Image (tube, rainbow, N blue to C red):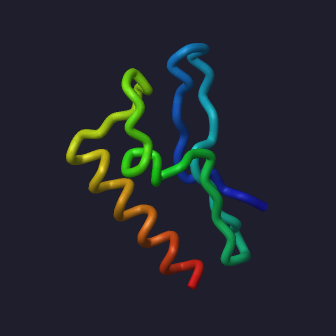
Amino acid sequence: MFTPTSTSTDPNSGDTFVATMEAMNYPIMGTNFHPEKELAQWTDGDGISHSWSAVTLNSYFGEEFIKLAR
């Protein structure tokens, strides 16, 4: 029913996992991460990239996700 649209790799175990997916015949999609983390979580040593490209990409992704939900 679902098609993976992106994968990611766990830096600790090296395991690959599905990061995003979408339904083949339904308007359903899902993520296995939080695109808002780059914008909201600023704990020292958290390992989250706060580079301009990370913030811009995740802002775009989050905004598009909200548009689709509306």
Extreme-top residue of the structure: 13
In the figure, 52 relative to 1: above or below?
A: above
Q: How many marks?
A: 0
**59 left or right of 27 in image:** left
Q: Quadrant of residue 10?
A: top right
Q: Which residue is drawn at 46% across and 46% down?
A: 37
Image x and y of residue 6, in percent: 52, 47
Locate the C terminus by quadrant. Answer: bottom right
Extreme-bottom residue of the structure: 70
**61 left or right of 29 in image:** left
Viewer-nearest residue: 17 or 49: 49
Image x and y of residue 33, in percent: 57, 45
In the figure, 22 relative to 43: above or below?
A: below
Locate the N terminus by quadrant. Answer: bottom right
Q: Which residue is drawn at 42% across and 62% down?
A: 61
Extreme-front residue of the structure: 43
Extreme-right residue of the structure: 1
Image x and y of residue 3, in percent: 66, 56
Q: Which residue is drawn at 62% across and 21% down?
A: 15
In the figure, 38 relative to 49: above or below?
A: below
Viewer-nearest residue: 4 or 49: 49
**55 left or right of 66 in image:** left
Q: Residue at x 59, y 79 (%)?
A: 69
In the figure, 21 relative to 29: above or below?
A: above
**40 left or right of 25 in image:** left
Image x and y of residue 43, in percent: 41, 31
